[in-house]
Image: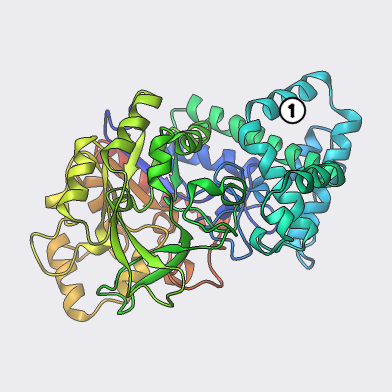
Amino acid sequence: MDPFERRRAGVLLHPTSLPGSVGNGDLGEEAYRFIDFLVECGVSLWQMLPLGPTHSDRSPYQCLSVHAGDTRLISLQRLVDAGWLDDAGLDPQQDIDAQRKVRLAAAYNGFLGHADNEARTALKAFSEQHAGWLDDFVLYQALRDEFNQSAWFDWPAPLRDREADALKEARKRLASAMERARFEQFLFFQQWTQLRRYANDRGVLLFGDIPIFVAYDSAEVWAERRWFKLDEAGELTVVAGVPPDYFSETGQRWGNPHYDWEAMARDGYRWWLKRIGTQLELFDLMRIDHFRGFEAYWEIDAAADTAVEGRWVSGPGADFFEAVRKAFDGLPLVAEDLGVITPEVTALRQQFGLPGMKILQFAFDGSADNPYLPHNHEPLSVVYTGTHDNNTTLGWYQELSDDQRYFVRDYLGIEAEPMPWPLVRAALASVARLAVLPMQDVLGLDGSHRMNVPGVTEGHWQWRFDREQLLPEHSERLKAWVQLYGRA
């Protein structure tokens, strides 16, 4: 199914932001209720952030694996329903993640004692199908637990450098922990497959997100060092980031390792093709974050404190996307083409017919040729009021100057409707085939409900909505406007 064959509406909500369970949302009852809400409103797409296991900062853009799923999303109640767990309850006064880990270990024991042949066969089939990444990941996870969550590059050298004897001994020593980790990934993929089937059967597509870069401390960098620009000891030689711009005098030094694109090209980009293949098991459509990095990327010496002394290096460009298109008989991708985009980046996107992104909060700088203004939109694009990195639309509007608010009101012609509804209308009315609204804007929430503030490492990625916030008027308004603007 081509997501862009007709006009559609979508809602952006990460599963951790669902209401219900203690700690964070999961793949249980509330996920299914959310799909029912989308169907009721005529919305046919659910967009979310990357689903990988996160570090302690909970950022889904710095995951422990590009293949594995976040075990925090596993519904414990569904394990109770399966007869593998006695108690799904978590005490909000205690460490939620520690309690969840204990519950999942108990569920594994329950599975060993009570699972039927069908479930055991399914686990075996999953393990065999995903062995290419799963075997390394479960060992990495078990070692990380053994070393108190320390990064792989701080492990003893024989394990850091994957010496054969050290790995053999670790697999023997940690066999039980590895099997539990394997079981947990089975649970995640099983529950996700059930949720995706439920959504697709009701006409709802799932829209995922692939960060271009991977975390230095991740299973793939540890296990497949040859694809990254590291020295013989696994130390970073160069890191990713972006150059100085209007927002930062020193640029942004992200610290992710860069790919050895020449080595990847010689191998036919198989590492990337496997990564995309795993994501296509989860999603119908995917956003490629920092698309411009495939045309050229900013490379910074690892010893540099800031991004100022970096340099532009040519990326894999068309050669990469030709390989992806050939492998998957198409390109179910959206290009995140925000920021300073050169003609070469635009040409690469257009060469492969990839939709770009239009953010309405970026539109109102006073110039009529701003590409984010609705009258400049292209049909093959995705329009947003804002994204997970933006303030909520109400919060954004409240922070504008009087002159900026005047321009917004003048352009949109708003006098009767308060924010965020005029910007929501503008997104849905756009010629862009796909319009996506953050759930915060569907609910009309202010800036205290934003998901993330770029560059701030603490206290984000934790927003959740409350079922009581979703009033009948929200559903009625969204349904009416989705129909009015031909997106039902």
Camera sees residue 424: yes
User: SS at mark 1?
Assistant: helix
Residue 378 locus on image (x, y percent): 17, 43
- Give 176 or 60, whichever is nearer the viewer: 176
Q: Please tell me which residue is depicted at 18% across the width and 49% down the height of the picture.
A: 344
Looking at the picture, tell me which residue is in the foreground, 287 or 20.
287
Pick the quarter of the image with the C terminus.
top left
Residue most extreme to the right: 113
Task: State the image coordinates of residue 367 (x, y, percent, origin top left).
Answer: 9, 66
Amino acid type at circle 1 is Leu
Residue, x 30% and y 31% (percent of image)?
322
Residue furthest to the left in view is 368
Residue 46, x across and y down, in percent: 45, 41
**Residue 439 in the image, given as x and y percentages of width and height:** 44, 54
Which residue is more in the foreground, 252 or 281?
A: 252
Whether residue 44 is visible: no
Q: State the residue in front, 63 or 201.
A: 63
Q: Is residue 341 above or below residue 193?
A: below
**Image quarter in which the N terminus is found:** top left
Residue at image location 35% in from the left, 31% down from the top = 323
Residue tagged by mark 1? 123
Q: Quadrant of residue 126?
A: top right
